[in-house]
Image: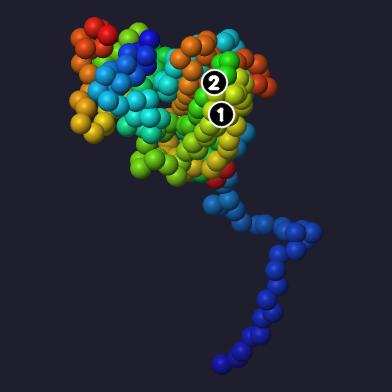
Amino acid sequence: MALVKSRSRGINLADTFAFTGTVSGAGGVDMAGTYFRATNGSAQSLSHVTWTKANMTTEDYDPGSNYNASDSKYVCPNTGYYHIFYHPFLQGYQSNNMMAKVYVNGSSTEASMGKNSSFTRFETAGYQSYFSMQSSFVGYFSANDYLELFIYIENSSQSLSQGTGKATSYWGGYQLA
Amino acid sequence: MLSTKVIKYLEDNSKDINEIRNGNVVLQNDGKSPPSSKVKIDNDYILSWSVTGVDEPTQSEIDAL
């Protein structure tokens, strides 16, 4: 039997490839089509020690129409990995604990969705009046899973709110793969 | 405000706000009317309650505070 010696060679990305057949299985995710970014357009009053759904009702980008602005809810269009980021601006004169986290399908418990969320907490001991609760993470979601951002602040004697502004209170995300 | 009344209820039962901070009591506002079965004031409601030795207050107990 004749032996053929072959030499291993990696793909040189500078080479030119002339395909004569059909390339299949090379489809990727339309990341831009899954992107959303939304902001809080008007001050949102918050109740003391109450997890409140963040009003992110001003849509900045949503090319795939996956974000429900009136309900501040993102519905994942496909199954896969998503990069999610949030940056709500919490304010209340000399407030205490400020917190934020992403709910998945209405759930916030660590046991059920901890690896697919991010919980941010800022313990201020009553000295902080403004803080941006920023975080980002990668989670794995199924098609039609929905994401919501919830926020929390402590101060029983002052007016509490989420601030406004496109660069001040926002969240967003997109599918990675 | 629901939170003020819940904290008073906790204190009346020898507990305090730390039951909320540590997640044994979760107060929530979804930006819409709460589920009908929940104890609530306006859109704020008690999502969950797990306080050792103290039952979740009823709607009438909260209203009376």
Q: Secondary structure at mark 1?
A: loop
Contact, mark 1 vs mark 2 (Cβ under 8 Å):
yes
Residue linked to disc 2: A95
Q: Please tell me which residue is depicted at 58% across the width and 15% down the height of the picture.
A: A93
Residue B54 visible in the snapshot? yes
Along the viewing direction, whichever of A59 and A18 lies nearer the viewer: A59
Residue A68 visible in the snapshot? no
A151 up-or-down from A111: above or below: above
Q: CA distance from mark 1 to mark 2?
A: 7 Å
Q: Chain of mark 2?
A: A
Q: Quadrant of the N terminus of chain A?
A: bottom right
Q: Amino acid at mark 2?
A: Ser
Q: Please tell me which residue is depicted at 23% across the width and 33% down the height of the picture.
A: B52
Counting from the top left corner in percent of width and height, residue A156 is at 45, 15
Q: Please tell me which residue is depicted at 79% across the width and 59% down the height of the picture.
A: A14
Dividing the picture into quarters, in which one does residue B30 lie? Answer: top left
Counting from the top left corner in percent of width and height, residue A40 is at 58, 16
Counting from the top left corner in percent of width and height, residue A131 is at 61, 25
Q: Is residue A109 left or right of residue A76?
A: left
Q: Which mark is residue A124?
A: 1
A20 up-or-down from A44: above or below: below
Q: Please tell me which residue is depicted at 50% across the width and 38% down the height of the picture.
A: A118
Q: Secondary structure at mark 2?
A: strand
Along the viewing direction, whichever of A16 and B33 lies nearer the viewer: B33
Q: Are marks 1 and 2 on the same chain?
A: yes
Residue lying at the far bottom of the rendered structure:
A1
**Mark 2 or mark 1, which is nearer the start of the sequence?**
2
Q: Amino acid at mark 1?
A: Thr
Counting from the top left corner in percent of width and height, residue B51 is at 26, 31
Q: Quadrant of the C terminus of chain A?
A: top right
